[in-house]
Amino acid sequence: MDTAGGTVRRSRATRRWIVAAVCLAAGSLALAACGSSSSGSSGGSTSGKVGVSLILKTLSNPYFVSMEKDAKTEAAKDNVNLTVAAGKEDGDTQTQISAIDNAISRGDKGILITENGNAVNTELAKARQAGLYVIALDTVPTPPSTVDITYGTDNEAAGKLIGQYAAAKLNGGKAVIAMLDLFNNQVVSVDIQRDHGFLEGMGISPGSTSLNGKEAKTGKYTGGKGDYVIACHQPTTGAIPGGKTAMENCLSANPNINVVYTINEPAADGAHQALQAAGKNKVMIVTIDGSCNYVNGLLKDGTIAADSAQYPGKMASIGVKTLASIARGGAKPTLPAGKDFINTGTALITANPVPGIDSQTPEKAVSACWGS
């Protein structure tokens, strides 16, 4: 009896020790898991940091520098581990492709990108297949379904604003127009949309939905109000030197140019330098972007006649906040009916307003401009 009773007691003790050991092991695992989620660099838990890649066209343009600045500010607020990469120049897709691959390898939860061209689309598809949520900034990719969603300005509407201004300012006078685009050797949607928007604002049909330079080279603008001539289409790569060279080429083709459309402000700056060198002081320059540098400079003094302001920092900060929320179980954004992007706004800025065209003065625009 005593032997049997001792055996029973030892058996019960053994079972209690095994249960305790299992519970202790389970507790250790739970603690390890908790510690891992709170200190991980790219996890999606509510307490851990969320890994996000911001992949920009270039960091030589203040427009994209502004995106970087505001994205970093938002990342600090939202406990996001932000990795920033950029092309060496506008159009550099290979650097962006490498950055997308790195984001996948790191286990990032999402990507924010301003595409340098359609060559990145295949890599973005790989990222989405790997579970990353991909947001385009500024420009809707071609096709829009390349990404999960886009935050950007209505670039066509921005172009229309400066086209409407130019037409109103001409008031029926002849328009000899230089079109200073982004590229002439690749198709980028922002290039098409801004170019076409300007022409539409002038009352000129672009002649194509997908390519620049297909409009009739002569005709009437604003419903027959005045005659126009398209003197040239020249690429600028969105930079000051490119704008200067493009304007020089255009003046060689037609020295009577009196209206210059440019894809962005640096291109407008370069065009202005070429016009100055040629002694052309009465040419209307219209452009798009709205940076503090140009609002306080060439726009304020009237050198640039009109500018459509955009808000790149706002796009980037909303993008970071969205990815942080999704990674932690938040709802994914949805598109407005009939749109392929979420519009972050635009406004016309000019020091010389014209009746019937809504605009802001440079002094007012400073409160929402970007860059330094």
Image: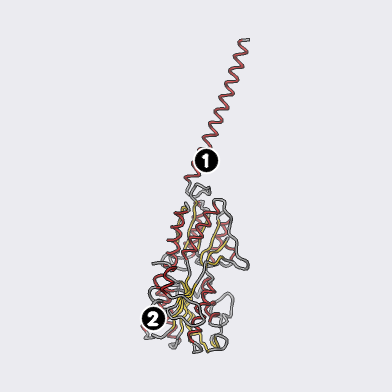
Q: Nearer the viewer, residue 199 or 188?
A: 199
Q: Tag on residue 274?
A: 2
Q: Compared to 181, does 138 lie above or below? A: above
Residue 332 location in percent, x, y?
Answer: 58, 57
Label 1 secondary element: helix
Q: How many marks overall?
A: 2
Label 2 secondary element: helix
Image quadrant occupied by the C terminus: bottom left
Image quadrant occupied by the N terminus: top right
Amino acid under label 2?
A: Ala
Number of other residues with Cα within 10 Å of mark 1, as a class: few under 14, some 14 to 19, many 20 or more: few
**What residue is at 49 percent from the left and 83 percent from the top?**
355
Residue 136 location in percent, x, y?
Answer: 53, 63
Q: Residue 326 vs residue 351: left or right?
A: right
Residue 78 location in percent, x, y?
Answer: 48, 53
Number of other residues with Cα within 10 Å of mark 2, as a class: few under 14, some 14 to 19, many 20 or more: many
**Residue that numbered label 1 is attached to:** 33
Q: Nearer the viewer, residue 107 or 3?
A: 3
Q: Compared to 249, does 13 lie above or below? A: above
Amino acid under label 1?
A: Ala
Q: Indicate which label's residue lies in the foreground, 1 or 2.
A: 1
Instruction: Tell me where residue 14 sits by quadrant.
Output: top right
Q: CB of mark 1 within 8 Å of CB of mark 2?
A: no
Q: Compared to 252, does 138 lie above or below? A: above
Q: Tag on residue 188?
A: none
Residue 259 location in percent, x, y?
Answer: 46, 83
Of label 1 and label 2, which has the lower sequence position? 1
Q: How is the image coloured?
A: secondary structure
Q: What is the spatial separation of the Cα atoms under label 1 and label 2, in whole angstroms? A: 63 Å
**What residue is at 56 percent from the left and 65 percent from the top?**
342
